Amino acid sequence: MKFLLKIIALLMILILVSLWAKPVLADDTNTQTNTSGSNTNITGGYESTSTTTNNNDGQTNTTTSTTTNATTSNGSSIPPPSANSPSYSSMSQDVCSMGISGSVTTGIVGFSGGKHVVDENCERIKLAKVLQDFGMKVASVAVLCQDKRVHAAMESAGTPCPYQGLIGPQAQEMWDKYPEMRPDYEEWKAKNEIIAKVDERIAEENRIEAERIAAELAKAAEEEALKQAKLLEEANEEINAITVVIDSVPINRNN
């Protein structure tokens, strides 16, 4: 991976150099002179002079015509030879490596290079298959668990990866105790942070809802208490309004 980053950085630098570089131009300036009467065929810039003299009746007429046509041509750029990328092959179908190469050509210079890169996932799969063929299933799973995607998938499925001879819930306890040992520690940490934020938000929402319900219950209890107090007051007023009549005539209990 680091080599790929270096190659990409080198290619970017070469591209910038190619943008700043100026192509090499060949100056081609032709100046030719043609005098009337000659058989010179001119292509390009030239200078032509023609003189005619007539003697008629003792008079001399001289006519001079000069035509100058100078053409300066800057020749087209001459590109340098293209840089060809080298060819890399794995030499075998059972080798977990691949060849990468690249090249860049500017107006001044060209570069090319390449190398072999090992595919670690391919190696893990082959190693796990060999261990599985030997009957070492736990070791085979442990090799695959070195990949962070497999480790996360095993945990999501409820079958945690082995931890130094431990499997099942015991292995999960050790992974929880030493999370830095996980191959997917950064992803696991980010996931737990998201879970913690969601749990905190849900707890806050539940707290607010509980406070709202408690306030409604308190308000209802207060209204009920006021209602009962009003009924009691009305009952007392009715009792006080009753007139008590006492009969002064004695009662004969025997009759």
Image: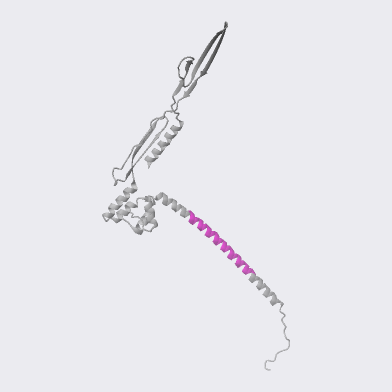
Task: Tell which residue pokes out farthest to the right in this image.
Answer: 248
Q: Looking at this view, is 24 or 131 the one in front?
A: 24
* View extreme (top): residue: 58
Residue at far bottom of view: 255
The location of residue 248, given as percent across then percent down, is 73, 86
Q: Is residue 215 shown in magenta? A: yes
Magenta-colored segment: predominant secondary structure: helix
**Residue lying farthest to the left in this orientation:** 134
- Residue 176 appears in the rendering: no
x and y percentages locating residue 54 in the rendered image:
55, 9
Q: Which quadrant does the C terminus fall into?
A: bottom right
- Judged left or right of residue 136, residue 201 is right
Please say whether residue 110 is visible from this viewpoint: yes
Q: Image quadrant of residue 208?
A: bottom right
Question: Considering depth in this image, is 154 or 246 the residue closer to the camera?
Answer: 154
Whole-percent x and y of residue 110?
39, 32
Q: Position of residue 89 (x, y in %)?
A: 31, 41
Residue at left offset 40%, top offset 39%: 8
Q: Which scheme is used to colour this image of the protein?
A: one colour
Q: Quadrant of the N terminus?
A: top left
Above/below status of 69 relative to 148: above
Count of numbered marks = 0
Question: Which quadrant of the structure image shows residue 100?
Answer: top left
* Picture residue at 49% right of the left edge, 55% below the top: 198
For the residue pair 249 and 74, the one nearer the viewer reads as: 74
Is residue 74 placed above or below 233 in the rendered structure? above
Write the residue at 54% across / 10% down: 53
In this picture, which residue range is highlighted in magenta?
197-226
Residue 112 quadrant:
top left
